[in-house]
Image (cartoon, rainbow, N blue to C red):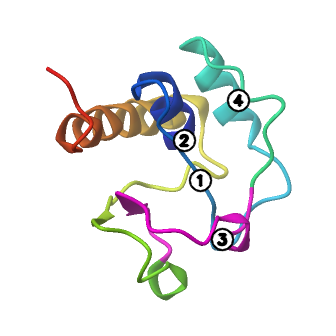
Amino acid sequence: MAEAFARRLAPSGIEVFSAGSRPAQQIHPAVLAAMREVGIELGDQIPKGLESLPAEQFDAVVEMGCGDACPTQGGKRMISWDIPNPKDQSLEVVRQIRNQIEEKVRDLLSKLPFHQS
């Protein structure tokens, strides 16, 4: 969800990546439905592991509850978001998580160097 919001909201030309420490085989149906409600279709996306990330320095790395499995380097700015895992949650709970993620993505993008007022 964070990757999808960042891709939608970031200025043109900004690269966005997302990966998990223990990626699922597929995106949870409630996540697909909740994102579809805000006009974002994730049907062609697949969860990716940390090994899929390019070996480069990122402007920001955000971790969401991966603990010791999270990368400790690779970002000029390391950020931790305490956001519940949407796995096996009801659609209503996933909507709340979606909204929280969108708010945090907006806030982060407003603070990165490329942001234009």
The vertical placement of 107 against 55, above or below, is above
Residue ID at (53%, 36%): 94
Is label 4 or label 2 in front? 2
Mark 4, secondary structure of its residue: helix
Circles 4, 1 touching at the beta carbon (< 8 Å): no
Q: Are the residues at dot 3 and dot 1 in contact (C-beta closer than 8 Å)? A: no
- Picture quarter with the C terminus: top left
> Label 4 neighbourhood size at 10 Å, few (<14), some (14-19), many (20+)?
some
Most common secondary structure along the magenta stretch: loop
For the N terminus, the image quarter is top right
What mark, if any, has residue 32 been given in the picture? 4
Circle 2 sits on which residue?
3
Distance from Cα at disc 3 to Cα at disc 2: 14 Å
Per the rendered image, the range of residues in magenta is: 48-66
Q: Amino acid at mark 3?
A: Leu
Q: Are marks 2 and 1 in contact (CB under 8 Å)?
A: yes
Q: Amino acid at mark 2?
A: Glu
Q: Name the N-terminal-most of marks 3 and 1.
A: 1
Which residue is label 1 attached to? Answer: 18
Q: Are marks 3 and 2 in contact (CB under 8 Å)?
A: no
Disc on res. 50: 3
Whether residue 51 appears in magenta in the rendering, the answer is: yes
**Could you tell which of marks 4 and 1 lies nearer the N-terminus?**
1
Asked which secondary structure carries label 2, the reply is: helix
